[in-house]
Amino acid sequence: MTEREKRRIRVFDTTLRDGEQAPGCSMNLPEKIEVAKRLEKLGVDIIEAGFPISSPGDLESVRAIAGIVKNCAVAGLCRCLEKDIDAGKEALAKAASPRIHVFLATSPVHMEYKLKMTPEQVLEHAVASVKYAKKFCNDVEFSAEDAFRSDPDFVCKVFGEVIKAGALTVNFPDTVGYAMPAEFGERIRYIKEHTPGMEKAALSVHCHNDLGLAVANSISAIANGADQVECTINGIGERAGNASLEELVMALKVRHDLFSAETGIDSTQIYSASRLVTQVTGVKVQPNKAIVGDNAFAHEAGIHQHGVLAKRETYEIMTPESVGITPNRMVLGKHSGRHAFEERLKDMGLSVDAETLDKIFAEFKNLADKKKVVSDRDIEALVMDKAVSVPETWKLDHWAVNTGSALGASGVIRLQHKDGRHEKLVCLGDGPIDSIFKAINQIIGKEPELELYEIGAITGGSSSQGETMVKIAMDGRRWNGRGVSTDVIESSIKAYLAAVNAMEWDLTDRE
């Protein structure tokens, strides 16, 4: 196949829907908006922004993203129920390119035990829902949940009827990650060849990673005729996750000779998108993660180092630069100016408005007074601190701790409320962090459960900033908080307050 005949594979990103459903991956509205903007810059074709009927917050976030994103389609997921589709219509009203994505299970186990419907009822329901969605939105996608464990001929029948009803995309998911690559590819070929009217719609796949085969199955599907792949940044998602966007895109790019298929993704934006999702969710990728892991382009063995120094292609099938990992040629410190700082942000794929830039640059100068050299990770942390924060109900004014092996621990903290008043409290605890967190809880009058407290260094060395991630929960709802500081106790306080402010914003300001 010539370059001119290459197939164009659509990338449907569900980081903000399936990815965010994963335990510990929840995001607040500013974080979701920032991720959506990065996905648009990355060049995805469709952003699945959420599940509008699931909560008022999800509907609001889909609506907000739909109003901002202009260069790709925005989808809302809906069950095959009119109330779901009505919520999707409302959420997507301002989208430049809206897509309503409806789904209904087609496997025997789902139909019998979950839906309690016959195959005939499922077919009727699927068609009626597509027709209803089509009244409000031309671009309708239908997904046959648990399609791989369904009877192939039944799926073909359902797909044929929903295409006749107006679906422009039909999605064949391996919902539980059960398939093997060879058989999944064969199944996609069968569906492509035996679905009536398939030439009028795009065939999509949505693979889960329960057996570690989501990317392999998706690639096999592309080789056998799939037109669209559904994936997430860093492969986050339910259970073991989804197919990883970065792995799919780079597999097609590196092996273009084999697949003759391409995407519209700007691969140089992959690393910054991966880092953003890591930062907002607090879920880190393992060091040996393909494409974006810390060790993905590291070479420790002597023979490898020698080969790479002699010619990169000896041990690298792609360059770090091809995914947006650029060498930091410019050292930033306390004498660096605003222009150099702005240029570094651009090199890192980070963009902020003028007001936020002023705040970040001021924080950069403060940090540069404490550290000789400010790294890219430090800068990234500063941007995240300012760009995706919710309104501050409580702001840190002052803190101090007293601790020792024989003394126990006490903490004093002074917070400023958004109405201008100050609250100060001293508490005893099992350690400095425990005492401070207890004091904060007493000041705010709530006692959320601390589900996760994790602290690490952003870079090496004793002058590194500490980065703390906390997750708190109350009444079945969860909030993330993140804080950075050269003092680990202060980074912990900032993280806890960030989570508290997210909670206050959800429970008070937005109700």
Image: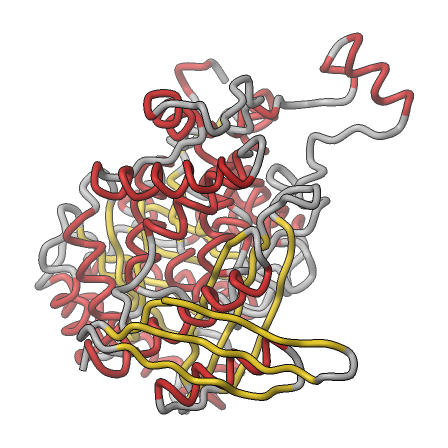
x, y (%) of residue 454?
A: 62, 66
When the figure is inspected, residue 179 is found, relative to residue 294, above or below; the finding is: below
Q: Residue at x 47, y 47 (%)?
A: 381
Q: Residue at x 26, y 56 (%)?
A: 75
Total number of numbered labels?
0
On screen, residue 440 versus residue 301, left or right, reads left
On screen, residue 85 versus residue 9, left or right, reads left
Say which of 111 and 290 sits in front: 290
Q: Quadrant of residue 120?
A: bottom left
On screen, residue 429 versus residue 56, left or right, reads right
x, y (%) of residue 292?
A: 60, 40
Q: Quadrant of residue 341?
A: top left
Q: Residue at x 55, y 48 (%)?
A: 244
Q: Residue at x 47, y 29 (%)?
A: 334
Say which of 105 and 391 sits in front: 391
Say which of 437 and 313 sits in front: 437
x, y (%) of residue 257?
A: 59, 20
Outermost top residue: 310
Whether residue 379 is visible to the viewer of this picture, yes or no, is: yes
x, y (%) of residue 373?
A: 57, 31
When the figure is inspected, residue 346 is found, relative to residue 391, above or below; the finding is: above
When the figure is inspected, residue 281 is found, relative to residue 189, above or below; the finding is: below
Q: How is the image coloured?
A: secondary structure
When the figure is inspected, residue 107 is found, relative to residue 31, above or below; the finding is: below
Give the quarter of the figure containing the C terminus.
Answer: bottom left
Whether residue 185 is visible to the viewer of this picture, yes or no, is: no
